[in-house]
């Protein structure tokens, strides 16, 4: 699990990121980012919809893999952003090691890495 202060939980927060944020696309993932209105910690929400897979086991596996990767990248991210990570249907069956370069590329394109990285 991500630490509680780094989790995006409420529907209104997800809606704000989708409405006011910017998206960055890749074959397996979509990254939505939006500056926070309050708070200083970067918060992350992970979405794997039923269109990705009808099987909950597959959706939960993808969410677990993405949570682990987000936990690894969290110390490298700048503060003050809300991030929503959406899995695409092509993500089904991929290994977590395959997600990491793609996720790093999306985060770099969004400009969320600290300047020293």
Image (tube, rainbow, N blue to C red):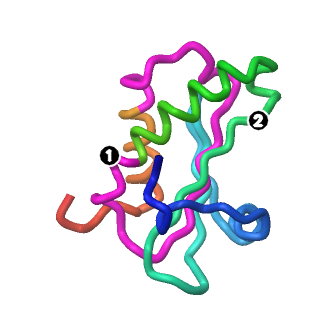
Q: Which residues are magenta?
A: 71-99
Q: Quick one: label 2, few (<14), some, or many (20+) residues within 10 Å? A: some
Q: Which residue is mark 2?
A: 49
Position in image of residue 20 (x %, y %): 72, 71
| Position of residue 24 in the picture relative to residue 72 (left or right) | right
Closer to the camera in the image, 94 or 112: 94
| Residue displayed at 78% across by 63% down | 11
Is 84 magenta? The answer is yes
- Quadrant of image for the C terminus: bottom left
Position in image of residue 95 (x %, y %): 45, 18
| Position of residue 70 in the picture relative to residue 26 (left or right) | left
| Residue displayed at 53% across by 57% down | 44
Position in image of residue 58 (x %, y %): 65, 19
| Image quadrant assignment for residue 96 | top left
| Image quadrant assignment for residue 53 | top right
| Residue displayed at 48% across by 68% down | 5
The image shows residue 99, relative to residue 35, as above or below, that is: above
Q: How many marks?
A: 2
| Image quadrant assignment for residue 16 | bottom right
Q: Residue furthest left?
A: 116
Q: Which residue is mark 1?
A: 72
The image shows residue 62, relative to residue 114, as above or below, that is: above
Which comes before the other along the chain, label 2 or label 1?
2
């Amino acid at each position: 699990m991500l630490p509680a202060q780094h989790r995006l939980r409420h529907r209104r927060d997800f809606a704000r990121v989708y409405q006011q944020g910017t998206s960055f696309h890749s074959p397996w993932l979509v990254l939505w980012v939006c500056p926070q209105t309050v708070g200083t910690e970067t918060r992350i929400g992970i979405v794997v919809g039923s269109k990705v897979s009808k099987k909950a086991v597959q959706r939960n596996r993808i969410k677990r893999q993405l949570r682990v990767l987000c936990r690894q990248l969290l110390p490298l991210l700048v503060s003050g952003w809300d991030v929503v990570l959406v899995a695409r249907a092509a993500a089904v069956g991929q290994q977590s090691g395959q997600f990491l370069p793609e996720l790093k590329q999306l985060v770099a394109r969004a400009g969320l890495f600290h300047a020293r990285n």
